[in-house]
Amino acid sequence: MTHGRAPTVPLPHIDADLHSHSCVSDGTLTPAEVVRRAHAGGVRLFALTDHDHLGGLAEARAEAQRLGMAFVGGVEVSVSWGDETVHVVGLRIDPTAQALVDGLAATRSGRQERARAMGEALARAGIEGAFEGALRHVSNPAMVGRTHFARYLVEQGVCGDVREVFRRYLVEGKPGFVPHRWATLGDAVGWIVDAGGVAVLAHPARYRLDAAALDALVDEFRAFGGAGIEVVCASHTRDDQRRFAAIASRLGMRASRGSDFHGPGENRVEFGQLPALPEGLVPVWHDWPEAARAGASGLASAGCA
Ligand code: AMP
Ligand code: MN
Ligand code: MN
Ligand code: MN
């Protein structure tokens, strides 16, 4: 593997999607279904990145192999940074790395209790049965989270869609919000790096941080060994893309791209429809053998057309 300087000849554009969820966390499709949908959408380099869980990776990898799609194992770790929850995506991790496996188990351990407290909080707001209802939307009870409550409230007709539930009930200051302590930033990045992976700061435009606080977050993240930042993702506007492209360039961070897919009908952007990374950035996959293989096959098929 090469390290350090970016290649002077850029790789041909490949449709890389390095952020997605299955029903192992809060997506609605099985890992194999997510992989098939990504492939059908034109994705050629793919990562499954379930929240705080590696349980879908073996199935996803097998399905990607069957389809001939380049695959890297991933995870999205929930982190508490001060009062804010931030997400760190780990890419190309070894799913057997013990510190990562143990750290994720500890990170998800409080979800059931938190969910019970959310159920009680929603009951006080007049919505009964939300804990049991959310569990009906969960494949993996250890991973019960806000998205499962949101689906229950939509099912009950309380709100029209998942986003409205978040806005009215599940974000800080709203009746169903229960604060929670996740992993520390240093631990999350450390687990990923020690597992041989690249740590990527997920959807940075989503955090309620002013410019100075965001700079501090990025500085800390890099000091712990974080190397990448999501520039193109479903929750970023064109302005956000430009802003984080500039930060990536200035700091020499690698740029990532991912749809944050959760399920058909719940996504702002379908597989295959994300904009390309802005020119001049070093993609997080620039020295990955999986990307070289995906790029080479893309060139071959273009050449034969
Ligand atoms: P949790 O880990 O249980 O706090 O849930 C976090 C998840 O909720 C995220 O990964 C998203 O899938 C989802 N989420 C967070 N904010 C929103 C929002 N405003 N609209 C829709 N989904 C959201
Ligand atoms: Mn999610
Ligand atoms: Mn996230
Ligand atoms: Mn995500």
Image (tube, grey):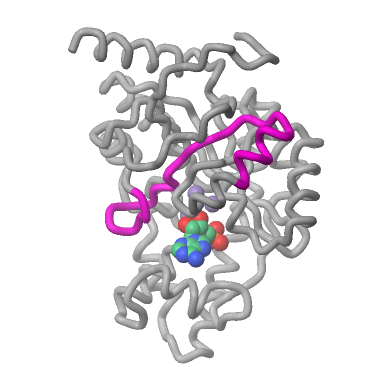
Quadrant in which residue 137 is drawn: bottom left
Tell me the residue at 32%/38% (across/down).
272
State left or right for residue 6 relative to residue 220.
Answer: left
Quarter of image, res 218: top right
Image quarter of residue 56: top left
Residue 198 seen in the current view:
yes
User: In what quadrant of the picture does the N terminus appear?
Assistant: top right
Is residue 224 left or right of 254 when viewed as pictured?
right
Residue 294: x percent and y percent?
Answer: 38, 17
Q: Classify 260 as above or below 10.
A: below
Q: Is residue 264 magenta?
A: yes
97 vs 139: above or below: above
Query: Which residue occupies 36% across, 79% down?
Result: 159
- Answer above or below: position of 135 versus 297: below
Residue 106 lies, in percent from the top left, at: 66, 48
Query: For the magenta stretch, what is the residue range?
Result: 243-269
Find residue 170 and report its horizontal and vertical position in percent.
Answer: 52, 73
